[in-house]
Image: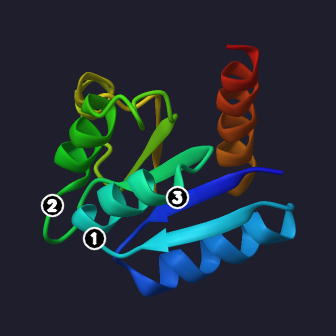
Amino acid sequence: MAKILLVEDNEMNRDMLSRRLVRRGHEILMAVDGGEGVARATADLPDLILMDMSLPVLDGWEATRRIKADPATAKIPVIALTAHAMAGDREQALAAGCDDYDTKPIEIDRLIEKIANLLGAKTAQ
């Protein structure tokens, strides 16, 4: 399956999501802040990134902008994960370079479908 980088500062969220994704056959890499997320994306070149937007050190908006600005990581699909479900948040995530957007609490089947759609689009490139 896919190598997925999960950038999430909340330990409970990291644990829950990583266990569910591993059960579906994915390899999970983790970062606990935006700076580490950018570094791991560059070093490990995952197939997809799940990016929390409210992160310490470097927020998810800026981390995504940096990942998308680097030619080595620009084509890696990024799904924004956020508890901020306010009007305009989806547009802000897409403007920062995210390829999709999902709200917390995570509905795992919906997220798996988004992951599959993006990975299918990536392999078609």
Q: Nearer the viewer, mark 3 or mark 2?
A: 3
Report the number of discs.
3
Decide: is 88 above or below 21.
above
Label 3 sits on a secondary structure element that is: helix
Q: Earlier in the sequence, mark 3 or mark 1?
A: 1
Decide: is 80 above or below 44.
above
Q: Nearer the viewer, mark 3 or mark 1?
A: 3
**How many angstroms separate mark 3 from mark 1 (CA)?**
16 Å
State the quadrant of the C terminus: top right
| Disc 3 target residue | 44
Decide: is 55 above or below 93.
below
Instruction: From the top left corner, tell me how far across and down residue 83 is, in percent.
Output: 34, 56
Three-letter code, disc 2: Leu
Three-letter code, disc 3: Asp
| Disc 2 target residue | 58
For disc 3, the neighbor class at 10 Å (few under 14, some 14 to 19, many from 20) is: few
Q: Which mark is residue 33?
A: 1
